[in-house]
Amino acid sequence: MKKNELKYTDLKKICDPNMFNFETTADLDNIGLVYGQDRGIKALEFGLNVNLKGYNLYLEGPTGVGKTMYTKHYLQELSKQKKVPSDWCYIYNFENSNEPIAISLPAGQGKEFKDVMEDFIKDIKTDIKKTFNNEDFEKEKALIKQEFENKRTSLLEALNNESMKHGFHVKATQNGIYMMPVIDGKTLEEEEFEKLDPSIKKQFEEKSNIVQEQVLVALSEIKTIEKSADKKVEEWQSNIALLTINVHINSIKAKYKKYKKIVNFLDNIKTDILKNINLFLIDDNPKTQNNQKPAQEQNAKPWLNYRVNLFIDNSHLEGTPVIMDSNYSYQNLFGKLEYENQYGMLKTDYTMLKPGLLHKANGGYIMFQAKDLLSNPMCYEALKKALSIKELSIENSVDQRNSMVLISLKPESIPLDIKVLIVGDSRIYNTLLAGDPDFKKLFKVKVEFEEDAPRTTDNINRLSKFVHSYCSNEDLLELDKEATAKIVEFASRLSDDKEKLSTKFNEIGEIIGEAATWAKFSKKKFVTKEFITKALEERIDRVKKHDEKYMEMIRDNTLLIRTDGSEVGQINGLTIMTIGDYTFGKPAKITVNTFMGKNEIINIEREVEMSGSTHSKGVLILSGYIGEMFAQEFPLSLTASICFEQLYGGVDGDSASSTELYALLSSLSGIPINQSLAVTGSVNQKGEIQPIGGVNEKIEGFYQICKMRGLNGSHGVIIPIQNVKNLHLSDKIIEDVKLGKFHVYAITTIDEGIEILTGVPAGKKDANGKFPAGTVNYLANEKLRKYAENSKKKM
């Protein structure tokens, strides 16, 4: 084994299936599924137990780390320990019908109150009709009416006696009282009266004025008697009705005597019934009614205002409500007032008030996805307003394009007592923090969820329980211990660290589901490790179209990548590409030409504006390294051009800076680089190798090409030693490393890397600042000295 070469055991941390005390995950329970979120859980518990204004929560973390899953589960358990919040009802406002009254009742009593009032309406309608249809009532009513008729008859008789003294007979009909002249005891008709002598007619006309005055006096007295009779009948009806009403009202009032609004409501109902007693006596059978009656007549049903709108019914809850939903429309969140079309008019009443999610969550918890909530600014602003004033009101709006006449209501606001949890990522949190001054006032608790956790035995066992929970919830085949070990290894690779486990439960769940599907296709009773491996391979195979295109171009030498021999100033750099949702690694040929000139390293990609800022910085660092290493006794007179050959999509990142430096040293020293090796790693001005990202994909990308062309024991890669902890290579690569067909080297300095690439010592300066003869640095130094001397001669 060569210097700096890694053992095959360094390339992946294997999970031993024998660490598990189960045969399949079906043997596990669902307790303690979440791992690595201690800080987040602590903040969550704190925020949920602070009962102060503004202590709502923002759950921050990457997508798929279990923020929603854990929080929902925690809230459901927490809610069971809390008191069930009150029911809310809306009732009719007799003083202002457009402003319905809100009533709070203990959970379950809202439904009871609604049922009580429905029974009251049914019973009062029936009992009033019975009361007014019985014989005793009709007899008393008839007596009052008869008394009126007797008085009326006496008045008419007295009037007739008086009118006869003046020659007139008074006749009473339904249409009024008529005067008719009388001669010799005979009542004259109009034709007979016209035939009379004018002098006689004149006498009758003169006397008629006296009789008319008597008639008017009599009519006035009759009306007074009639009103008195009607009043007496009404009073009698009211007294009778009151007895009936009180039987029902008083029992309800006694039951709800603690609730002032209900008592006042019942008193108003009593007054309204007495006021509209006649409407209760009308037959309301639809078959007997005229459907052509106008809406006002058809709707003359005062008892409709005695109904109760059970707005929020919490009778079914076992604790406080926990609400999650995906519909973030304004009406779904804040409630609405429904309408119905009656004769071209949008009509409504208090029973058509409908609650929103915030009403349903009142007294408990509600969770929002930040991205969805903020996509509707009207909802977000209304939410902030409600949290600030701690009240919920229903503000209905109708499409402005609707030409129908609108009758709306303004219901009484309901006090708001709620914990709001917004789930999102750090980008949204930072944007709200910087751009919305209200956000910090209303969401004072930030709950951070990690994307990885230490790879401890406890966390591995928790991951196993998650596997069981996921299989149970999704009705999937369970995993055996070897398959579970593969899931642990996959979670470790997802975290990009051997000593950690990813908390991206969404991705882990996807692999479990796909593996279970393959096992089901094979008619297995549980999932084995082969199906986990197949799921991972098939997932990549489904999206590796572009990867295969690159492989084809390399195989056909359309892309010139050498994996054998040696070349001066040429090296294989490991790059990584992301296309859509697939990331893969492939080598790129990097070439360097050096020649005498002013102190300048030309980054060809930068010159044609294809270099990102980080890559350009990496190239500039090379000048600092070359200057300190070689230009202590003479000035640099060097021009070097660096190019990523056949790369047309732009370059960014500094992971190729060490690779470029190796090619530069090769060009200066004239020592060729072994083309069977590929390199990745960042470098600083002191020549120290720094870690990079995507190390597994980069190694696997170069390995694929070498495997395609045939491994001969010379192939391998050089990586930063800091990235050893990130290694989680495929079993195929590990096997070939074990057999000596492929090699992985981990280095800390440029000198270590150049020695592996060239097989020649790098060379260190002695006490006199001289490099040992024949070393890479010696030859490079001599080339630069020659450039400096030649440049000096030309000046």
Image (cartoon, rainbow, N blue to C red):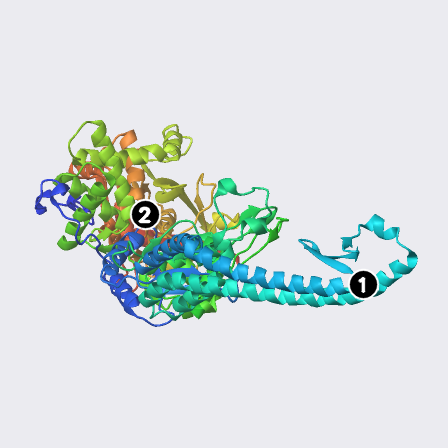
| Residue found 80% across the figure and 52% down from its top | 188
Mark 1 closeness class: few <14, some 14–19, many ≥20 residues within 10 Å: some
Instruction: Using the image as rendered, state which of residue 333 and residue 629 is in the foreground.
Output: 333
Q: Position of residue 314 (x, y in %)?
A: 32, 57
Instruction: Using the image as rendered, state which of residue 202 and residue 449 is in the foreground.
Output: 202
Q: Position of residue 210 (x, y in %)?
A: 79, 67
- Name the quadrant of the N terminus: top left
Kindly tell me whether residue 566 is visible in this rendering.
Answer: yes
Left or right of residue 151, residue 360 in this image: left
Residue 224 sits in quarter:
bottom right
| Residue found 80% across the figure and 50% down from its top | 189
Comes first in the chain, label 2 or label 1: 1
- Disc 2 or disc 1, which is closer to the eye? 1
Kindly tell me whether residue 410 is visible in this rendering.
Answer: no
Q: Is residue 343 above or below residue 430?
A: above
Task: Report the Cα–Cα distance between label 2 and label 1.
Answer: 121 Å
Q: Position of residue 400 (x, y in %)?
A: 61, 52
Residue 550 sits in quarter:
top left
Per the image, label 2 sits on a secondary structure element best described as: loop
As drawn, which residue projects farthest toward the right?
A: 198
As drawn, which residue projects farthest toward the bottom?
A: 52
Per the image, label 1 sits on a secondary structure element best described as: helix
As drawn, which residue projects farthest toward the front?
A: 184
What amino acid type should be assigned to the residue bearing mark 2? Gly
Q: Is residue 431 above or below residue 504?
A: below
Question: Which residue is disc 2 drawn over?
Answer: 694
Question: Which residue is disc 1 drawn over?
Answer: 208
